[in-house]
């Protein structure tokens, strides 16, 4: 992915962190702040790896032995509230820094990269899921609880950027079996495969399934690039970036991009 694409993804993740921290602070979800601190430090590190110095030091985390009394139910300690405010403030500053960097790069508005667009959709997917749960007067909504729900919501989001979306195309046989792909963007020669982690479908099982999927899809005449979106809202994949790196590949004939989000 280009540096511009990585910056845009980083900006999306930073915006999501700022919203999440603000929401948790308002609702008094005090126990989430250690995770929010780790997320900010990770985002700040990603910015530095892209050559962008935010000018901010990592947020100091509290030793695990001191977390017990700080994450319980209650009104929230002054330390907890201060940590939320620090995460929100620094995430906002990092967001502004990234926006300035992207503006300075002056990327042409007409630039079209289907993989960047898909990466942005996948990055925002969990934010959309969370937002859908909050409807006026308790109205019915889509609760993404299984892989079919992931496919339905992603199909709707794909329509923001793509016109020709073909669901459930057959793939050629591999090891005596054929299967259906989730979505085919035929004009772009891109196939999208979705997974959702659950009990019994963690990192090992997802990895094994994707290895088989890759063998199926690389034989399809309309697939030049396979995008595997793994929705992991419960963080069942302990090392998502490692699994992404292990399975992603790039070549002229067939490329694979694995995206494990959030």
Image (spheres, rainbow, N blue to C red):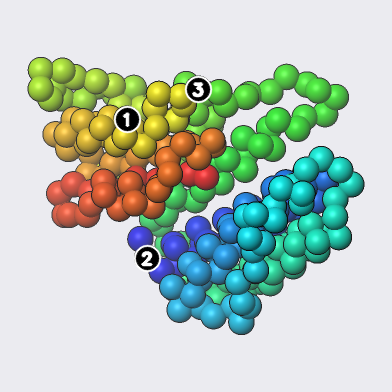
Please tell me how crowded label 3 is: few (under 14), some (14-19), or many (20+) other residues with Cα within 10 Å. few
Q: Is residue 172 left or right of residue 146?
A: left
Q: Residue at x 26, y 46 (%)?
A: 247
Q: Quadrant of residue 187?
A: top left
For the residues marked 3 and 1, what is the alpha-carbon distance in whole angstroms?
16 Å
Give me the disc on residue 6: none
| Count of marks overlaid on the render | 3
Q: Position of residue 135 (x, y in %)?
A: 77, 29
**Which residue is disc 2 drawn over?**
2
| Figure check: 165 above or below 138 | below
**Nearest-to-viewer mark from 2 and 3:** 3
Residue 3: x percent and y percent?
A: 41, 69
In the picture, the disc for residue 205 is 1
Quadrant in the picture for the N terminus: bottom left
Mark 3 lies on residue: 146
- Residue 15 seen by the camera: no
Dot in front, 2 or 1: 1
Mark closer to the chain start, 2 or 3: 2
Q: In this view of the protein, which residue sits in the foreground, 224 or 136?
A: 136
SS class, disc 3 = loop
Towards the viewer: 102 or 95: 95
Residue at image position (69%, 69%) is 90
Label 2 – label 1 distance at C-alpha:
30 Å
């Amino acid at each position: 992915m280009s540096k511009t694409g990585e910056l845009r993804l980083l900006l999306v993740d930073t915006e999501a962190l700022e919203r999440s921290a603000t929401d948790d602070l308002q609702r008094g979800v005090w126990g989430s702040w250690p995770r929010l601190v780790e997320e900010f430090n990770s985002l700040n590190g990603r910015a530095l790896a892209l050559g962008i110095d935010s000018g901010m030091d990592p947020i100091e985390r509290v030793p695990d032995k001191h977390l017990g009394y700080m994450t319980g139910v209650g009104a929230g300690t002054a330390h907890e509230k201060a940590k939320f405010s620090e995460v929100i403030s620094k995430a906002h500053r990092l967001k502004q820094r990234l926006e300035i960097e992207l503006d300075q790069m002056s990327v042409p508005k007409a630039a079209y990269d289907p993989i960047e667009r898909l990466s942005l959709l996948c990055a925002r997917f969990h934010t959309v899921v969370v937002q859908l749960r909050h409807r006026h007067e308790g109205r019915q909504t889509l609760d993404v609880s299984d892989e079919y729900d992931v496919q339905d919501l992603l199909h709707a989001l794909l329509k923001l950027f793509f016109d020709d979306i073909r669901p459930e195309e057959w793939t050629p046989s591999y090891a005596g079996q054929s299967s259906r792909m989730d979505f085919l963007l035929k004009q772009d020669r891109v196939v999208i495969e979705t997974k959702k982690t659950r009990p019994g479908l963690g990192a090992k099982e997802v990895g094994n399934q994707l290895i088989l999927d890759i063998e199926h899809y690389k034989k399809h005449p309309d697939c030049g690039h396979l995008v595997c979106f793994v929705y992991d809202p419960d963080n069942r994949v302990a090392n998502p970036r490692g699994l992404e790196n292990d399975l992603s590949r790039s070549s002229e004939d067939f490329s694979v991009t694995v995206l494990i989000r959030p």
